[in-house]
């Protein structure tokens, strides 16, 4: 067994800088646009292996196994979700139903700003609550592209919108992970997050439209934004504090969509914003308007055009429930301990209160994977649309070929994230945040942001740093529930810059090779929003009346 070493150079600052080399390498290569994303990920993986083995004394065999374990988890479930979502999307495009669907959305409102609120924020929040793991960005990015938004707008704005719902994604999976890592009550953690994120659920719709249309463009539709943000934020607080943390996103998104659509029946903006291009410089992405239709689709055709996505919503909703998993997992799970890695790595103080071994068991829950549900929904939808089995099989092969580099990128990035966790590189960076004393509520929140940026998952970040948050907060006399929640709340703002999400967005918008442009667009938004969450947590830690919101 190998025990993690968090300060191999005898100087925490130096050790932290060395630990950051792989992720800095990855982001720098992606941001330059000089190196393709899959090559950037493979290069960063080699750098991570070198740092782990030669810098942090991790045995080479264990390091290689950790990277391999991560590669498998990159394909299942993340890559599996993306592959099947894009497969469904391509079927709807080929049949012409997606064109009718985009016409129906435009029929609700021709204003691009309100389309963003409806599709990327409200509709995306539903898919985050039901499935998570990249599904909302994949779906909303594809829908926005179909509506004529530029690739940069469709991908970047989908990433910004998919923030506040993330903490309750996939039927509360991040909450369950945080409770498991800390031993704290999941209902208390969910309620505390529900006293932090609603403020940002209210802000993000304004932020989203400002990023798209500028300040004046935002002010012109402030009533619609107010209805969107307020309905979602109030619902998010209500569900998280008075019902349970598992259905927060689904409940809040349904309320939000209903309120927005109802409001649009009595109010429309005085000026219709028809351009799908970003208000800021969007020269790198050509914006095309919605293609004109030869004729107006009938109500029957519009209803049928929504069928594939209604089928997807229904199937994914069932697939995400605990009772469904409880039925299928015992009969459709293959658990494979990774030889030479399972229980061969030990976390030690101060990251954990007492030494704990890291398990490494690949649970191939093939039937309960969200991606499997999406594939079944795609097959059902394909049959409804009139596709033959032979044509769907051929289309699936075509989808795999189109996504080959994106899938390779996701696999390599998950390999980096998993290697980072098992080698202790992430813990070394986390410890640097833990030594900030009075300012720990702020930097502890940014630790959650860092965790999601590194792993691509709020759940993984909570599992990764939840124990550290609990130990450090107790040492500093802070509420462990406050800082556990802050880890998740801060983490959601890192979702828009994690490499996996950026690759998913580029894949969904068919904008391969431009991941750097997407990263540069969203990075400043991610930093600013994460700092605002940190400022709120500081107020909750020390300043009344904010401190009265804290659960102990």
Image (spheres, rainbow, N blue to C red):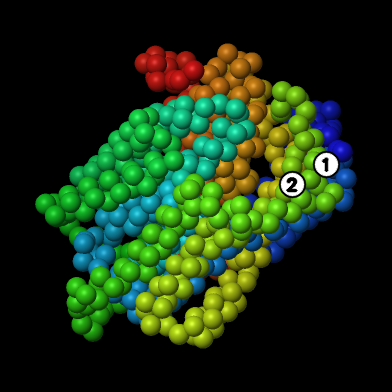
Q: Is residue 100 above or below residue 280?
A: below
Instruction: Name the residue: 38% across, 59% down.
Output: 314
Q: Is residue 387 left or right of residue 231?
A: right
Does residue 399 appear in this view? yes
Can you identify the residue that label 2 sits on? 360
Q: Which mark is residue 93?
A: none
Q: Is residue 264 left or right of residue 541?
A: left
Residue 113 x/y as whole percent: 28, 56
Numbered circles on residues, count: 2
Secondary structure state at the residue bearing disc 2: loop
Instruction: Tell me how far mark 1 sits from mark 2, CA to CA.
Output: 9 Å
Where on the picture, by quarter, is residue 413? Answer: bottom right
Residue 428 x/y as whole percent: 73, 34
Tell me, yes or no, whether the two marked residues, 1 and 2, touch with CB atoms within 8 Å. yes
Residue 349 x/y as whole percent: 76, 25
Does residue 128 appear in this view? no
Front residue (pair 83, 223) = 83
Front residue (pair 309, 157) = 309
Residue 168 x/y as whole percent: 45, 41
Q: Earlier in the sequence, mark 1 or mark 2?
A: 1
Instruction: Name the residue: 56% across, 22% down.
Output: 480
Q: Residues within 10 Å of mark 2 (few under 14, many from 20)?
A: many
Q: Is residue 162 above or below residue 448?
A: below
| Quadrant of the frame with the N terminus | top right
Q: Is residue 543 above or below residue 256?
A: above
Can you identify the residue that label 1 sits on? 344
Instruction: Name the residue: 71% across, 28% down.
Output: 351
């Amino acid at each position: 067994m190998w025990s993690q070493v968090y300060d191999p150079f005898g100087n925490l600052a130096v050790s932290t800088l060395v630990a950051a080399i792989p992720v800095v390498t990855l982001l720098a290569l992606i941001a330059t646009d000089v190196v393709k994303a899959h090559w950037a990920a493979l290069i960063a993986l080699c750098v991570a292996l070198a740092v782990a083995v030669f810098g942090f004394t991790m045995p080479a065999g264990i390091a290689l196994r950790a990277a391999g374990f991560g590669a498998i988890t990159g394909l299942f479930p993340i890559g599996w979700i993306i592959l099947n979502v894009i497969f469904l999307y391509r079927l709807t495009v080929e049949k012409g139903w997606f064109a009718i669907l985009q016409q129906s959305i435009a029929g609700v409102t021709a204003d691009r700003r309100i389309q963003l609120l409806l599709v990327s924020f409200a509709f995306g929040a539903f898919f985050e609550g039901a499935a998570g793991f990249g599904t909302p960005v994949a779906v909303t990015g594809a829908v926005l592209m179909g509506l004529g938004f530029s690739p940069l707008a469709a991908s970047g704005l989908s990433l910004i919108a998919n923030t506040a719902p993330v903490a309750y994604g996939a039927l509360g999976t991040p909450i369950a992970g945080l409770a498991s890592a800390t031993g704290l009550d999941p209902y208390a953690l969910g309620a505390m997050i529900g006293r932090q994120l609603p403020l940002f659920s209210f802000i993000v719709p304004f932020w989203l439209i400002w990023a798209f249309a500028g300040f004046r463009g935002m002010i012109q539709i402030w009533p619609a934004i107010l209805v969107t943000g307020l309905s979602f934020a109030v619902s998010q607080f209500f569900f998280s504090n008075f019902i349970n943390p598992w259905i927060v996103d689904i409940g809040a998104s349904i309320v939000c969509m209903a309120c927005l659509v109802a409001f649009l029946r009595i109010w429309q903006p005085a000026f219709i914003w028809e351009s799908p291009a970003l208000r800021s410089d969007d020269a790198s992405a050509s914006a095309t308007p919605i293609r004109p239709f030869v004729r107006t689709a009938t109500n029957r055709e519009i209803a049928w055009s929504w069928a594939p996505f209604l089928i997807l919503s229904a199937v994914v909703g069932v697939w995400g429930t605990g009772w469904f998993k409880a039925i299928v997992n015992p009969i459709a799970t293959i658990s494979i301990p990774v030889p030479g890695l399972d229980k061969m790595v030990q976390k030690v103080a101060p990251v954990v209160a007492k030494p704990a071994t890291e398990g490494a068991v690949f649970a191939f829950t093939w039937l309960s994977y969200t991606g499997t549900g999406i594939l079944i929904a795609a097959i059902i939808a394909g049959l409804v649309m009139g596709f033959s089995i032979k044509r769907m099989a051929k289309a699936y092969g075509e989808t795999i070929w189109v996504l080959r580099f994106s899938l390779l990128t996701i696999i390599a990035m998950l390999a980096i994230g998993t290697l980072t966790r098992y080698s202790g590189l992430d813990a070394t960076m986390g410890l640097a945040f833990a030594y900030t004393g009075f300012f720990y509520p702020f930097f502890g929140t940014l630790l959650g942001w860092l965790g999601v940026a590194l792993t691509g998952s709020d759940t993984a970040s909570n599992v990764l740093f939840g124990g550290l948050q609990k130990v450090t907060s107790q040492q500093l006399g802070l509420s462990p529930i406050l800082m556990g929640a802050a880890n998740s709340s801060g983490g959601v703002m890192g979702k828009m810059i994690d490499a996996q999400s950026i690759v998913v967005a580029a894949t969904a918008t068919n904008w391969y090779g431009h991941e750097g442009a997407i990263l540069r667009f969203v990075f400043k938004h991610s930093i600013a929003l994460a700092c605002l969450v940190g400022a709120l947590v500081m107020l909750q830690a020390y300043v009344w009346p904010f401190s009265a919101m804290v659960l102990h």
